[in-house]
């Protein structure tokens, strides 16, 4: 029996806090405080760690599939994931489990289709490389009697395909109540650095065969974002897309920058709108900027003017604050960005000065929960993925350093 409709996501009710779990597409009210309504009161680690949320309910609720990450829920019975890091989790009884998935690959996508990790009872299985169209995929068979857990984790980025989930089938078994939410929430916003671009290309680069952005070179599961969420035991929303900037993208004719995509449940579909009340983060990490100062493709029009970059940073932070009034916001300079590459553009200096300025301005205005942070610059030995991107050791290192900084402000 296919089980698509008993779905579970968290919503945030007034005050703000963890509200009752609702299915994709269900409505819920939540905080949308204006920028000037900055939270006041204690900024101690103890109060910051609460992030405005009461403790998660210990009750698992009725049988349901649990979704973590940004999903397009225009069709509640068939949620679609494009952003990396989407998770589809279910507890069940039965000896087999399969999933019906529909893969969408558009004509301009050269590196698809999507790839998903499969976990059964917490154990990683061979990755799932999807076929275009709607198909059934056997995820596990010959399981022992008793309860089990299945999880699908989207490891590839949106530009390589997006996936519609039509349900799990437990072969005569039964769906059980879902696992509880982590109780902490992190949102990561950024470009190829936190996305884990080319992380599987170690030993094949620096110019990996075929498109460097292909799904088979990606693995968001190993990225600093996913590792950070695991380290601090938090649910994660990943609003990351390689090649994107705040004002200009690496591919200059592309107008869809991260601030534009930030409002979308599917980054490549401007018709979709993300419901921010379904996921109000306690912590937001913004790591972006290198592409604004990169050598533009196919024709270089120079770096983003510094004032435009400053203005875009201010605006995005205001937007984040409006959707997450209590979040701790960390403006992190990517360790892979330097002043030497490309020469003469002072990429790291420009990003650093901007993030320091924005954090200072927010503090003066009364918002004491915005910080500029600077993990140490990457060594060349860490940048051995495709196109000189970080290897797994690099992502692990940066995740640990971000976790330590976050702990000083949240008490996590």
Image (cartoon, rainbow, N blue to C red):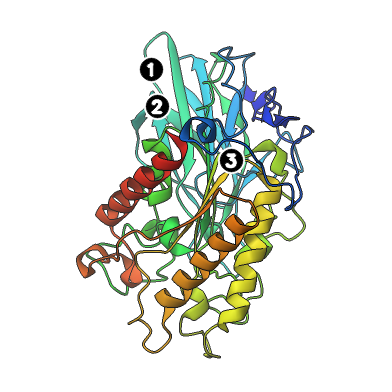
Q: Residue furthest top?
A: 146
| Residue in the image at 40% along x and 23% along y | 141
Residue that badge 2 annotates = 120
Q: How many angstroms separate mark 2 from mark 3 (CA)?
A: 27 Å
Q: Are marks 1 and 2 in contact (CB under 8 Å)?
A: yes
Q: Quadrant of residue 195?
A: bottom left
Q: Are marks 2 and 3 in contact (CB under 8 Å)?
A: no
- Callout 1 secondary element: loop
Q: Are marks 3 and 1 in contact (CB under 8 Å)?
A: no
| Labelled disc at residue 143 | 1
- Looking at the rendered image, the disc whose residue lies closer to the viewer, 1 or 2, is 2
| Residue in the image at 55% along x and 48% along y | 369
Depth order, front residue of 304/159: 304
Q: Tag 3 or tag 2, which sits nearer the N-term?
A: 2
Depth order, front residue of 404/286: 404
Q: Position of residue 333 (x, y in %)?
A: 42, 64
From the viewer's perspective, is residue 63 above or below residue 47?
above
Crowding around mark 2 (Cα neighbors within 10 Å: few <14, some 14 to 19, many 20+) is some
Crowding around mark 1 (Cα neighbors within 10 Å: few <14, some 14 to 19, many 20+) is some
Q: Position of residue 45 (x, y in %)?
A: 47, 35
- Looking at the rendered image, the disc whose residue lies closer to the viewer, 2 or 3, is 3
Q: Position of residue 303 (x, y in %)?
A: 52, 85
């Amino acid at each position: 029996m296919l089980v698509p409709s008993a779905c579970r996501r968290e919503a945030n009710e007034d005050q703000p806090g963890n509200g009752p779990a609702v299915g994709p597409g269900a409505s819920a009210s939540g905080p949308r405080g204006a920028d000037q309504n900055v939270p006041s009161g204690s900024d101690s680690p103890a109060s910051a760690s609460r992030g405005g949320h009461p403790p998660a309910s210990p009750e698992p609720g009725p049988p349901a599939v649990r979704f973590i990450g940004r999903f397009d829920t225009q069709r509640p019975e068939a949620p679609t994931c494009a952003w990396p890091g989407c998770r589809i989790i279910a507890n069940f009884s039965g000896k087999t489990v399969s999933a019906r998935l529909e893969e969408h690959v558009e004509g301009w996508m050269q590196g698809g289709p999507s790839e998903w990790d499969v976990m059964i009872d917490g154990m990683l299985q061979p990755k799932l490389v999807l076929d275009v169209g709607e198909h059934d995929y056997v995820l596990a068979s010959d399981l022992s009697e008793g309860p089990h857990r299945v999880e699908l984790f989207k490891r590839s980025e949106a530009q390589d395909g997006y996936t519609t989930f039509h349900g799990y089938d437990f072969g005569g078994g039964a769906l059980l109540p879902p696992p509880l939410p982590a109780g902490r929430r992190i949102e990561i916003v950024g470009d190829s650095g936190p996305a884990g671009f080319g992380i599987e290309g170690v030993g094949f680069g620096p110019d990996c065969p075929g498109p460097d952005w292909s799904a088979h070179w990606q693995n968001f599961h190993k990225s600093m974002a996913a590792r950070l969420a695991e380290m601090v035991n938090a649910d994660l929303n990943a609003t990351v897309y390689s090649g994107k900037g705040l004002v200009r993208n690496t591919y200059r004719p592309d107008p869809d920058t991260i601030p534009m995509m930030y409002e979308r449940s599917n980054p490549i579909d401007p018709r979709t709108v993300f419901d921010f009340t379904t996921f109000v983060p306690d912590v937001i990490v913004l790591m972006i900027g290198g592409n604004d100062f990169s050598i533009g493709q196919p024709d270089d029009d120079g770096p983003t003017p510094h004032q435009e970059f400053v203005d875009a940073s201010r605006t995005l932070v205001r937007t984040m604050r409006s959707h997450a009034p209590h979040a701790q916001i960390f403006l992190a300079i990517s360790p892979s960005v330097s002043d030497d590459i490309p020469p003469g553009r002072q990429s790291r200096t420009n990003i650093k000065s901007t993030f320091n300025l924005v954090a200072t301005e927010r503090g003066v205005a009364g918002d004491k929960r915005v910080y500029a942070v600077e993990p140490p610059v990457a060594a060349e030995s860490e940048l051995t993925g495709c196109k000189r991107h970080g290897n797994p050791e690099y992502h692990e290192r940066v995740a640990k350093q971000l976790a330590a900084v976050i702990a000083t402000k949240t008490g996590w």
